[in-house]
Amino acid sequence: MANFVSDWASIAREANIIPSPTMTGSSIFPPCTNLPSTDIYTNTIVNVPIENIKKRYRFSNSKLEMLKSQVTSEAEVQNPSRVDVLSALIYKCAVTAARAQANSFKPSMLTLAVNLRPILDPPLATRAIGNMVSFIKVETTSVDEITIAGVVRELRKAKDEFKKEDHVNANKLVALHSENLPISNEFETYRSHSMCNFPLNNLDFGWGKPNKVTIPPIGVGFCFILMDSPSGDGIEAIVAVPETYVTQFENNKELLQFATPIN
């Protein structure tokens, strides 16, 4: 989507520009005739709609570096990504808030949408056309497992699975994608989506760059979208919090140690 809109903006500014998408999908994933006949979404649990309150936070580059350093020292994960450490922080704060409101802990799951292009081995071109996206998940079944460092470590392990050479084919990816879909009501699901590193803040259709680009989190339960800050200083998170524990979430001391609320 980001590549398409970026090309659209370029053509709007200069009609003689010719987009150059990379059409390599068929060579990487040849047509298959033996994919699973069962719809991988058939058994996906559809949650009952929950009233959400939207909150927005800014995490500066300096705060993100502090968070990354903390994770590196505690989890021995080298160079964790900004998205991973921030997703883990928000997940921990959300689970903590839900637990405080309910006075009990329910097994929880963080799902993270991932762009396959940079993490496959070899990496795919940034402009490769297609839905090169899948999901990874981290399941936590006890309170002791809800640590930022532990969640980041599990996210790294899940991403490493996609880097294995034998996963770079359609059958393997479909199977792995199916395994990572949240299909059980035994877990409370928290969803993270990242639009970081996509050039949305630089789109110019001929009348200047936008002051702000916003994509609202869509889904049920707790979900959030991470986007590059328009100023270039860090990441903004748009968080949809169930109203039952929004007060506990927005007053979480660990969250406010790194986040600046945006009204």
Image (spheres, grey):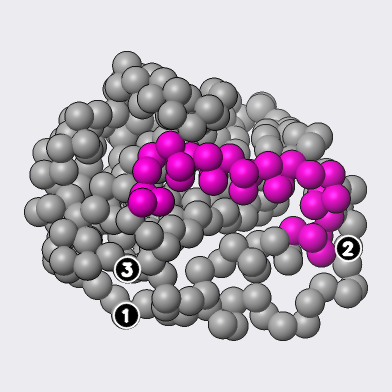
Mark number, residue 48: 1
Q: Look at discs 2 and 3 and give the one toward the viewer.
A: 3
State the CA–CA distance, disc 1 to disc 2: 37 Å
Span shown in magenta: 144-173
Q: Position of residue 92 (x, y in %)?
A: 32, 48
Mark number for residue 81?
A: none
**Number of numbered discs on residues:** 3
C-beta proximity under 8 Å, tags 3 and 1: no
Indicate left or right for 16 with 141 as reference. Answer: right
Query: Could you say which quadrant of the image residue 180 lies in?
Result: bottom right
Pointer 2 and pointer 3: residues touching (CB < 8 Å)?
Answer: no
Q: Position of residue 252 (x, y in %)?
A: 16, 43
At a point 41% along the width and 20% down the height, the residue shown is 69
Pick the quarter of the image with the C terminus. Answer: top left
Q: Quadrant of residue 230?
A: top left
Nearer to the camera, 25 or 133: 133
* Residue occupying image coordinates x 79% and y 37%: 121
Q: Which residue is mark 3?
A: 106
Give SS at disc 2: loop
Q: Which residue is mark 2?
A: 31
Q: What is the CA distance from the residue labelled 3 to the residue labelled 1?
A: 17 Å
- Tell me if 19 is positioned left or right of 28 in this view: left
Q: Amino acid at mark 3?
A: Lys
